[in-house]
Amino acid sequence: MITCTRKVQFDAAHRVMNHESKCKMLHGHRYVVEATFAADGLDELGRVIDFGVIKERLTNWIDNNWDHNTILFQEDRALGDAITQQLSQKIFYLPTNPTAENMAQYLLKTVCTELFPEPNIKCIRIRLYETPNCYADAV
C-alpha cells in the first residue's frame, strides 16, 4: 500500500464539557491535522491523490467550518448561544465532546467520507495535534 499525507493547520476555540481540570474552560489551540490517504494503485501520473485535491476539499472544509471558530459539543448550546449573542461568533457543534480524539474521528468518519467519495481512494488516518506535544489518531 502507498500513502500520502497532507498537513492542514487552523486556530479554534473549544471546551470539554465536564472535564475534571482547566479544559472545562473555553480556550484555544493552534491545531494541526495530518490527513493520510491510500489507494489500491497509483493514478496515471504516479499519485495516490493530488495534494491539491486534498487542499481544495479538506482545507476548504476546515477553513469554512473550524478555522477561527468555536467548536462545542452539541449539548453545550447554552455557552454557544451566549457566545453568539455577545460576539456574533460562529459556532460549530460536534455530536460529541470536542476532544482531540473525537475531532479526529469526526474528520475521518464524517468529513473525509463525504469529501472523498472516490471508491479507489480512502482517508485511512487523521492525526490531530491539539498542541505540539499532544495528538490523537483516528484510523
Image (cartoon, helix red, strand yellow):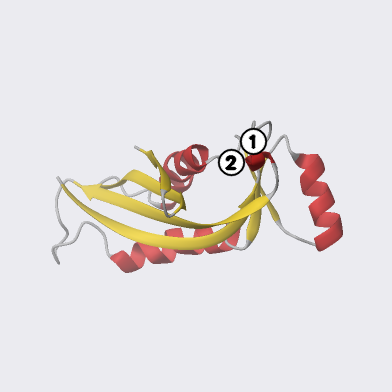
Would residue 85 appear left or right of 44 to someone viewing this image?
A: right
Which residue corresponds to the image point at 46% horizontal and 62% vertical from the top-left? 9
In this rendering, the answer to whether 127 lies above or below 19 is below
Question: Looking at the image, which residue is at 44% across and 39% down?
Answer: 109
- Going by the numbered disc 1, the residue's amino acid type is Ser
Q: Position of residue 101 (x, y in %)?
A: 47, 38
The amino acid at mark 2 is Pro
Disc 2 target residue? 98
Q: Position of residue 28 (x, y in %)?
A: 61, 55
Q: Nearer the viewer, residue 97 or 113?
A: 97
Extreme residue in the front direction: 21
Residue 58 percent across, percent down from the top left: 44, 58
Does label 2 or label 1 sit earlier along the sequence? 1
Q: Quadrant of residue 19?
A: top right
Secondary element at image label 2: loop
What mark, if any, has residue 21 been given in the picture? 1
In-front residue for pair 41/5: 5
Q: Residue at x 80, y 62 (%)?
A: 88
Q: Which mark is residue 79?
A: none
Measuring from the top left, give residue 71's x and y in whole percent. Answer: 64, 49
Which of the 4 quarters of the picture holds residue 125?
Answer: top left
Q: Where's the N terminus, which quadrant?
A: top left
Question: Could you tell me which residue is drawn at 69 percent across and 38 percent down?
Answer: 74
| Label 1: which secondary element | loop
